[in-house]
Image: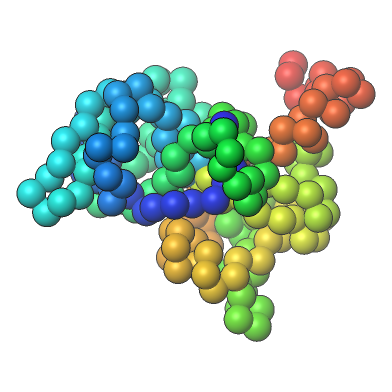
């Protein structure tokens, strides 16, 4: 489990088929083989790691064809910056909301507008995911826990504060960029209990 609070920005060191090498500033001594790390919201397993000459940690992770086809990972190339979050440990502060690291679909940035000191993004969600998005509810976009402002059909807005723009990849996000989207876990289960997901699952 994760909270949607980004703790590092990694860089894709290499990408070969379904294997990625990621460079980050996490201390290699604190990462175990088999550890889970969220990459732009997608939970991946560390399979190998080393410390590079420049002091950064570089680790390998394998990605299935299913994940490559249903997330943005299929388009990742060396040099891409990626939001990272270590998995939640007992006793950690739950600063965002409960995030599983299981991407539900790919959303798209429709507009980016300065809004005071913050930046307002309008996002278009896949049709099957739109019913799970509610005003003042939570959504994870590229692994970042965000509060939904306005919802209109398949589109909704979020405001990104200056701190988040600096410590995540949101500062460089632009119109037409694709985003990994995970809907709120509570919304998903409530909809399931109410029988609202039948059409989306067919």
Q: Is residue 175 above or below residue 190?
A: below
Out of 175 and 157, give the one closest to the viewer: 157
Task: Tell which residue pokes out farthest to the bottom in this image.
Answer: 116
Task: Tell which residue pokes out farthest to the top in this image.
Answer: 202
Quarter of the rendering occupied by the C terminus: top right
Q: Is residue 139 above or below residue 73?
A: below
Q: Is residue 161 above or below residue 107?
A: below
Q: Position of residue 53 (x, y in %)?
A: 8, 49
Q: Residue at x 22, y 43 (%)?
A: 57
Out of 176 and 121, give the one closest to the viewer: 121
Quarter of the rendering occupied by the N terminus: top right
Q: Residue at x 71, y 60 (%)?
A: 157
Q: Position of residue 129 (x, y in %)?
A: 72, 36
Residue 136: in sight, yes or no?
Answer: yes
Q: Position of residue 138 (x, y in %)?
A: 72, 48
Q: Residue at x 31, y 28 (%)?
A: 32
């Amino acid at each position: 489990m994760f909270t949607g609070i980004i703790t590092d920005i990694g860089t894709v060191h290499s990408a070969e088929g379904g294997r990625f090498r990621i460079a980050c500033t996490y201390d290699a001594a604190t990462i175990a083989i088999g550890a889970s790390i969220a990459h732009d919201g997608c939970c991946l397993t560390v399979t190998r790691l080393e410390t590079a000459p420049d002091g950064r940690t570089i680790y390998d992770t394998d990605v299935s064809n299913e994940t490559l086809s249903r997330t943005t990972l299929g388009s990742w190339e060396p040099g891409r910056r990626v939001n990272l979050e270590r998995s939640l440990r007992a006793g950690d502060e739950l600063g965002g909301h409960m995030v599983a690291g299981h991407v539900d679909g790919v959303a798209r940035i429709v507009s980016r507008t300065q809004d005071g000191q913050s930046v307002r993004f309008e996002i278009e969600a896949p049709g099957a995911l739109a019913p799970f998005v509610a005003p003042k509810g939570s959504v994870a976009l590229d692994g970042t826990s965000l509060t939904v402002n306005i919802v209109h059909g398949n589109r909704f807005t979020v405001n990104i504060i200056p701190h988040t723009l600096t410590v995540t990849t949101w500062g460089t996000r632009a119109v037409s960029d694709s985003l990994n989207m995970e809907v709120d876990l509570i919304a998903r289960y409530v909809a399931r209990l109410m029988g609202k997901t039948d059409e989306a699952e067919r």
